[in-house]
Image: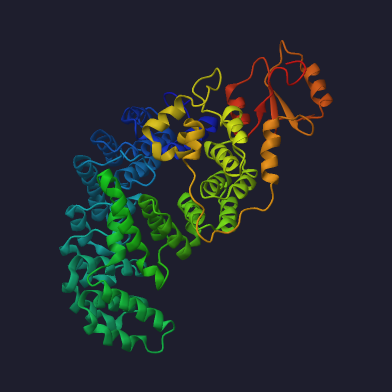
């Protein structure tokens, strides 16, 4: 569906590609050969938007060849600006985030990318103007001293690029020329200087304290205490006199004394900016430590820059620790969506049924919330929440099956596994394959961490039961009504009275009017389109597989021969 030789990328193809980039990020990187599609997309004969999306695609395949191709785009002055900007972003993006665990930047690929970014930065420094919005952020990932040399020539120009990597020479320049930096970058630069120079920075920091604005003054004093110890507490105490929240600031000083020499934000950012360059087996431990570092100072004050919470969230995701998700959400409730799955897991493990149900609805994750409730011993609450889900996903079906078993209805579990499995993904234009289809089997082999519910369903009754966990101590009580079980019973009973039916596709041999009359006679009613909430559909003589997939994902079930007159 992608346009050929310069055609515009728009409409359905653009939407489908955007969805693939978003939803496929966790597993596409398992197939390095897919980089070839990205190389085709960034070809000079393609439209600018397709080339830009190609740069995004290639970020999932950071090979030496990818770095060379992206560097060529970024260094070519004739490259359209949106494409060049995206290429610069991809060259600097060393974060693993949600990508497949096998994704990793090699030393050679990093060297090629760094040289290209520094060459662009050198040109900007010579011109005295940064024309690229993406360049300073991309440079925050660069650890090479060549970048530090560029910044040292004009620190005021590169304030946005200063974050967690710098050479000692650059750190000394920043101490001397701190006033050249725009005010919004100074606190970040101060932390960087302290992390790089250590105690060497203390005399200069103390010399700057008297004339500094209050926020910079406090930051410098905390850094001095972190580097030089309790001997400098007197200077801080004199500054705190008369300030609001002085006790909280004293608590931060105490934290620095207990963690001598640590500049936690900088240390955490160094990991956050380089996770895709780390060996996969080291990432969980590194992300765990970085999550602690990025959250350490929020006990005393909010981060001044919102992006720090986003990187903290990705470190929590990388740690795979539900407790750390709870800590992040407590400090920054807006991060719930980023750590949704871990946050729900934490609530379920602690038996917070009401809070989990509310979060699942707010975060559009009813099927995930239901799965966690079923796993952690609250089956009726799980079924009640599952009834509100809008998509027939593996997680939803697993939740129903396990919840029915734990509610004392293994017969319903058997029927769910036999009659109400989730739809498979489309792999051709003929029909949806039987569950599990090729897509599902591939996920189980190549991205098992993304397929917990799939694995349970493929394992049948034993696989579902294996997902059960003991209810947490002092958990909130389960729902007191058996109505949720009755709802599953009605769904599996496939009764037509009161239901809705959609006639899907073209009816050539089948008599559409006769089928419509039979629907009304059975006590059901026809709907005019494949709307969410439709109970059943009748497959016409010809029906696009995409339409059937849409109906099945929305939970509609196909009426079988003998269930309705005329089919």
In the depicted structure, whether residue 364 falls above or below residue 33: below
**Do we see residue 157 in this rendering?**
no
In the depicted structure, whether residue 442 falls above or below residue 321: above
Residue 323 place in picture, x, y as percent: 42, 58
Is 189 positioned to the left or the right of 490 in the image?
A: left
Residue extending farthest front: 408
Q: How many marks?
A: 0
Is 515 positioned to the left or the right of 341 in the image?
A: right
Q: Nearer the viewer, residue 169 or 414?
A: 414
Q: Quadrant of residue 25?
A: top left
> Which residue sits at x=19%, y=63%?
170
**Do we see residue 388 in this rendering?**
yes
Which quadrant of the figure contains the C terminus? top right
Residue 562 place in picture, x, y as percent: 73, 17
Residue 252 place in picture, x, y as percent: 34, 76
Is 112 positioned to the left or the right of 216 in the image?
A: left
Q: Nearer the viewer, residue 256 or 536?
A: 536
Indicate how the structure is coloured in the image: rainbow
Residue 50 place in picture, x, y as percent: 43, 33
Q: Quadrant of residue 52?
A: top left
Q: Quadrant of residue 418?
A: top right
């Amino acid at each position: 569906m992608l346009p050929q030789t310069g055609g515009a990328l728009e409409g359905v193809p653009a939407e489908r590609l955007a969805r693939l980039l978003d939803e496929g990020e966790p597993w596409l990187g398992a197939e390095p050969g897919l980089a070839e599609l990205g190389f085709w997309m960034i070809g000079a004969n393609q439209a600018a938007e397709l080339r830009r999306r190609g740069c995004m695609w290639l970020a999932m395949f950071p090979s030496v060849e990818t770095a060379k191709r992206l560097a060529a785009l970024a260094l070519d002055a004739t490259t359209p600006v949106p494409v060049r900007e995206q290429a610069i972003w991809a060259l600097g993006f060393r974060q693993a985030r949600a990508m497949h665990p096998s994704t990793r930047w090699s030393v050679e690929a990093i060297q090629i990318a760094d040289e290209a970014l520094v060459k662009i930065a050198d040109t900007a420094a010579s011109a005295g103007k940064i024309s690229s919005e993406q360049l300073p952020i991309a440079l925050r990932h660069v650890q090479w001293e060549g970048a530090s040399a560029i910044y040292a020539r004009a620190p005021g120009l590169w304030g946005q690029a200063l974050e967690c990597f710098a050479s000692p020479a650059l750190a000394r320049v920043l101490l001397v020329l701190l006033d050249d930096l725009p005010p919004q970058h100074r606190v970040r630069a101060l932390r960087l200087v302290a992390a790089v120079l250590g105690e060497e920075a203390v005399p200069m920091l103390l010399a700057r304290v008297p004339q500094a604005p209050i926020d910079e003054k406090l930051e410098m004093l905390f850094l001095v205490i972190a580097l030089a110890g309790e001997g400098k507490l007197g200077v801080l105490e004199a500054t705190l006199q008369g300030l609001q929240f002085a006790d909280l600031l004293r608590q931060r000083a105490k934290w620095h004394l207990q963690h001598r020499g640590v500049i936690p934000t900088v240390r955490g950012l160094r990991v956050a900016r380089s996770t895709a360059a780390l060996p996969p087996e080291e990432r969980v431990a590194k992300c765990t430590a970085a999550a602690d570092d990025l959250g350490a100072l929020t006990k005393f004050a909010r981060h001044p820059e919102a992006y720090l919470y986003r990187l903290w969230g990705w470190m929590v995701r990388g740690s795979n620790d539900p407790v750390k998700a709870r800590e992040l959400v407590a400090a920054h409730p807006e991060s719930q969506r980023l750590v949704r799955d871990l946050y729900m897991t934490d609530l379920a493990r602690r038996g917070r049924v009401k809070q989990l149900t509310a979060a699942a609805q707010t975060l559009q994750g009813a099927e995930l919330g239901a799965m966690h409730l079923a796993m952690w011993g609250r089956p009726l609450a799980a079924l009640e929440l599952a009834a509100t889900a809008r998509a027939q996903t593996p997680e939803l079906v697993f939740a129903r099956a396990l919840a029915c078993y734990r509610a004392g209805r293994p017969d319903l579990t058997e029927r769910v596994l036999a009659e109400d499995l989730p739809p498979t993904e489309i792999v051709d234009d003929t029909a949806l394959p039987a569950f599990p289809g090729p897509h599902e089997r591939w996920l189980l082999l190549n991205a098992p961490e993304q397929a917990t519910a799939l694995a349970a369903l493929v394992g049948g009754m034993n696989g579902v039961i294996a997902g059960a966990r003991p209810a947490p101590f002092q958990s909130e009580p389960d729902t007191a009504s058996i109505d949720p079980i009755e709802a599953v019973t009605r769904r599996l009973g496939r009764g037509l009275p009161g239901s809705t039916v959609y006639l899907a596709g073209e009816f050539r041999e089948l008599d559409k009017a006769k089928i419509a009359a039979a629907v009304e006679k059975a006590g059901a009613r026809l709907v005019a389109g494949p709307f969410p909430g439709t109970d059943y559909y009748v497959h016409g003589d010809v029906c696009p597989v995409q339409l059937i997939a849409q109906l099945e994902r929305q939970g509609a079930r196909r009426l079988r021969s003998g269930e309705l007159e005329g089919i």
